[in-house]
């Protein structure tokens, strides 16, 4: 019988500082923080916090999943970097720490999420409304075959230092994304290719590995249940009959990710077991 489960750090209390949309040229740097209520797949309602800073050109979303994990997505538009962090409740009776931290870093594409300037101007309407995404985007399966050196990570994105501080030994990315960043001039010494099945023929998936102290390939799945993925445009006609378009809202999306990565022992991947 399992004992009481540890508690993860609470979501930070946020003050919503929404700005009115400004016509014409973009205004000065803006920040916004707000909460939305979203429904999880099992029907449970949770709060998701969203933060935007157009000055540093980044966006952050954070929510607690049904199993108690705290998931954060940080989008660094300036560096074209996307950082996922998961704080997963540990199983103390099985020798794990209070919580386990993971960071997954991938290339950010410009069409994945609305710009930080637009996010910083969002207005919250009906804050008690429980929201569900208008569009469900397909599950993305990613093989994270490279480790990232935490002490050098700031060269890739300044946000890695804060976001991944609890996951210093568990920061992963993909070789194909590394190639993109190297072409941009990022120092390659921060990356280390991880062992693969081609290097270790007996390397199994953790869910099939019976020995908790053997290395294996772990899988972790997370989902961003609600995020502003696209801008909506409306049309207006002036007195002279000229038609123009303007930003008049957002389209929301949900997207899931499964990350596969090497761990030196199955003890670091106890959630990935067959039941």
Image (tube, rainbow, N blue to C red):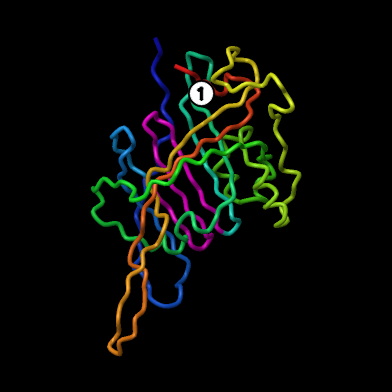
User: Which one is nearer the viewer's eye here, 216 or 76?
Assistant: 216
Horizontally, residue 30 falls left or right of residue 251, namely: right
Q: Give the image quarter of residue 143.
A: top right
User: Mark 1 sits on what residue?
Assistant: 272
Q: Residue at x 42, y 55 (%)?
A: 229
Q: Residue furthest top?
A: 1
Q: Residue at x 31, y 32 (%)?
A: 42
User: Which one is nearer the viewer's eye here, 197 or 228?
Assistant: 197
Horizontally, residue 238 falls left or right of residue 52, namely: left
Q: Position of residue 140 (x, y in %)?
A: 51, 41
Q: Position of residue 50 (x, y in %)?
A: 40, 50
Label 1 Cα neighbours within 10 Å, binned few <14 / some 14-19 / many ≥20? some
Q: Position of residue 3 (x, y in %)?
A: 40, 14
Q: Is residue 259 above or below residue 152?
A: above
Q: Is residue 93 above or below residue 7?
A: above
Q: Give the image quarter of residue 215.
A: top right
Q: Residue furthest bottom?
A: 240
Q: Position of residue 246 (x, y in %)?
A: 36, 72
Q: Give the image quarter of residue 117.
A: bottom left
> What is the magenta range?
49-77
């Amino acid at each position: 019988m399992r004992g009481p489960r540890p508690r993860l750090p609470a979501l930070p209390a946020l003050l919503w500082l929404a700005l009115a949309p400004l016509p014409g040229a973009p205004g000065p740097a803006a920040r916004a923080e707000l909460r939305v209520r979203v429904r999880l797949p099992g029907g449970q309602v949770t709060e998701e916090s969203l933060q935007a800073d157009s000055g540093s050109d980044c966006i952050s979303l954070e929510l607690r999943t049904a199993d108690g994990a705290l998931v954060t997505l940080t989008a660094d538009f300036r560096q074209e970097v996307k950082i996922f962090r998961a704080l997963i409740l540990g199983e103390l009776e099985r020798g794990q720490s209070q919580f386990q931290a993971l960071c997954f870093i991938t290339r950010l594409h410009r069409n994945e999420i609305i710009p930080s300037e637009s996010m910083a101007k969002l207005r919250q309407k009906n804050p008690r409304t429980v929201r569900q995404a208008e569009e469900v985007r397909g599950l993305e399966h990613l093989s994270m075959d490279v480790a990232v050196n935490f002490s050098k990570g700031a060269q890739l994105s300044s946000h890695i230092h804060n976001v991944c501080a609890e996951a210093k030994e568990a920061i992963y990315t993909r070789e194909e994304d590394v190639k993109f960043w190297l072409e941009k001039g990022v120092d390659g010494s921060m990356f280390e290719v991880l062992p693969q099945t081609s290097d270790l023929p007996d390397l199994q998936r953790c869910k099939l590995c019976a020995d908790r102290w053997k290395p294996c390939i772990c899988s972790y799945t997370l989902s961003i249940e609600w995020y502003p993925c696209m801008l909506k445009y409306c049309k207006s006609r002036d007195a002279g009959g000229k038609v123009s378009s303007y930003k008049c809202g957002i389209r929301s999306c949900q997207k899931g990710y499964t990350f596969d990565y090497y761990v030196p022992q199955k003890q670091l991947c106890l959630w990935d077991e067959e039941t």
